[in-house]
Amino acid sequence: MLDVPTEMLDLTDRRLINRLQDGLPITDTPYQAIADELGLSEADVLTRIASLLERKVLSRFGPMYNAEKLGGGLALAAMEIPETDFERVNTIINALPEIAHNYQRDHRFNMWFVIATESPEAVEATAATIENATGYHVYCMPKREEFYVGLRFAV
């Protein structure tokens, strides 16, 4: 969730966000099941999710896939970008469909992003594409082992 004043969220929005963090039920009508749990209509659940996305309370709402189990490739990547060129490089990287998310850090390596591709070989090809388009080196750090950390933000 982004920095949104909590007064922008009513109690129902908060209950919905908290419930969605636990995942969707495996059923033919998952939104109806959540609506029933929260005492809402399915239309209200869908309208509220759309509103939360539109207001940028939620930055993304959708499934998370395990790229490796689907035969794909995944790597954390970092770049060292001069502040004066950060926005240009950011725009180039965010335009690529292989970029899962991108964020800035207060560090020598100030741009970090995840490369998710259809094959392990395509990770390096994507890094090369970024290097050619930006003129900066991409440091790829492929995942060696996965750890699951359940993370919830109560709102």
Image: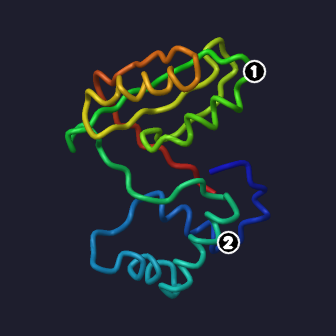
Q: Residue at 42% of width from left, 19% of height from top?
A: 140
Rate crowding at label 2 as few (under 14), some (14 to 19) or many (20 or more) other CA atoms within 10 Å. few
Q: Viewed as shown, does residue 142 lie left or right of 13?
A: left
Task: Give, as a three-letter code, the residue at label 1.
Answer: Glu
- Circle on res. 11: 2
Q: Position of residue 43 (x, y in %)?
A: 52, 86
Image coordinates of residue 129 in percent, x first then y, are 45, 27
Task: Note whether 33 is above or below 65 in the view shown.
Answer: below
Question: Which x, y percent locates residue 53?
Answer: 61, 63
Quadrant position of the C terminus in the picture: bottom right
Marks 1 and 2 in Cβ contact (< 8 Å): no
Q: Where is residue 98 drawn, in percent x and y?
A: 42, 40
- Residue on which disc 1 sits: 83
Q: CA distance from mark 1 to mark 2?
A: 40 Å
Determine whether 32 is above or below 144 in the image.
below
Considering only order in the chain, which callout, 2 or 1, is on the residue closer to the N terminus? 2
Q: What is the three-letter code of the residue carrying label 2? A: Leu
Could you say which quadrant of the image residue 34 lies in?
bottom left
